Amino acid sequence: MSLDALRGFDMFWIVGAEELIRGLQKFSGGGVLGLIAEQLHHKAWAGFHFEDLIFPLFVFIAGVSLVFSLSKTLQQTDRRTAAVRILKRSALLYFIGILYYGGFSTPFEQIRLLGVLQRIALCYLFSGLLFCYLKPKALIGACAFLLLGYWAMLSWIPVPGHGAGNFAEGANLANYVDQQFLPLRKHDGDHDPEGLLSTLPAIASCLLGVFAGLILQNPALTDRKRVLRLVALGLGCLAVGWLWHLNFPVIKKIWTSSFVLVAGGYSYLLLASFYQVIDVWKFQKWATPLVWIGVNPITLYFGGHFIDFEAMAKLFFGGPIGAAFGPYQELVMALTTLGFGFAFLRYLYQRRIFLRV
């Protein structure tokens, strides 16, 4: 249950953060609400805010989940069957990602080949195949190879006009590779935050989740040992990641290796906290709404194209009634929009309706 709740917690910020940001912007001048509003904005380039954790946390959770799903498949069938399943699921999720960014309703050159869902699909694809064919020690080696290899490439391979070791936007190797080899639409003009080269360390983010899944799945460990190992890994990743930041800055838009470790560290600590509270202490009722989201993430993420919860909220608070709330109107609208989303997901959960890839 803790994993579903953590996934729901993550999805809540993915789909609800924009509305909350708009509602909190009026209070960004200072105080606690101002600090919260600041954390709900991505860092322009180097550094780390809470908002920068949301996407890598989902990739991390995908790694945790694949341990349980693929272990069952491997026990019941064989590696070939598991590999075919991985390929099918990845291809379907990748295709949904193409549709999410406009599909084929736009001119061909406006199709976005790499985006959030496509990155998740690629991370699941390679992490899943590595999990099927490598033992845990080899998986650790693969993760280290991806992180160190990415750092070495960005540090030592020169970029025309900028040289080697330049991590500024537009001057680094990851952006250059997108400029030269990524066709069609790119999110940031001539490069993409979910670009080609930065997919490599993103796979490492998923592998960090795989290691967490192996800890949770290990029957030889007590609950206490599971939590302690997750916390130890989290603190270790944070320490190494922030130290590495001094040489290889924490930058989400090119998914630097230090960013992988910092985001992974926070992800381990969040998973440990959710597991301790929900699965060990059995404090579960508070997490029920998060579970509604966590078991139907694709429905919520993709469903916004078909159900406009914000438009529904405007029917109630978009006119004079909403104006009566004064500066709080946007915040009331945001909370109402989220309320409609929760109600819809509760309806699906109660009727056991789940959209899964």
Image (cartoon, rainbow, N blue to C red):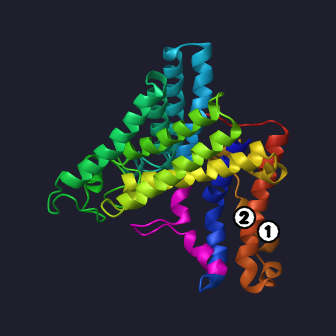
Residue 273 location, x and y as percent?
67, 52
Dot 2 amino acid type: Ala
Provide the secondary structure element on which disc 1 rests.
helix
Magenta range: 32-55
In the rendered image, residue 151, in percent from the top left (x then y), is placed at: 29, 50
Task: Please state if 58 lies on the left or on the right of 348 as rendered.
Answer: left
Q: Quadrant of residue 142?
A: top left
In terms of image quadrants, where is residue 161?
A: bottom left
C-alpha gap between disc 1 and disc 2: 7 Å
Q: Residue at x 41, y 55 (%)?
A: 240
Q: Nearer the viewer, residue 137 or 313?
A: 137
- The residue indicated by pointer 2 is 311
Left or right, residue 301 beside residue 312: left
Classify 10 Å Cα crowding around label 1: few (below 14), some (14-19), many (20 and above): few
Q: Position of residue 344 (x, y in %)?
A: 79, 50
Q: What's the residue type where badge 1 is placed?
A: Leu
Q: Do the numbered discs 1 and 2 sit on residues whose CB atoms are within 8 Å? A: yes
Q: Is residue 43 above or below residue 230?
A: below
Pick whichever, 261 or 163, lies toward us: 261
Can residue 177 be seen from the camera position used here? no
Q: x, y percentage for residue 252?
A: 42, 58
Q: Residue at x 49, y 42 (%)?
A: 208
Q: Quadrant of the C terminus?
A: top right
Label 2 residue SS = helix
Q: Which residue is mark 1?
A: 315
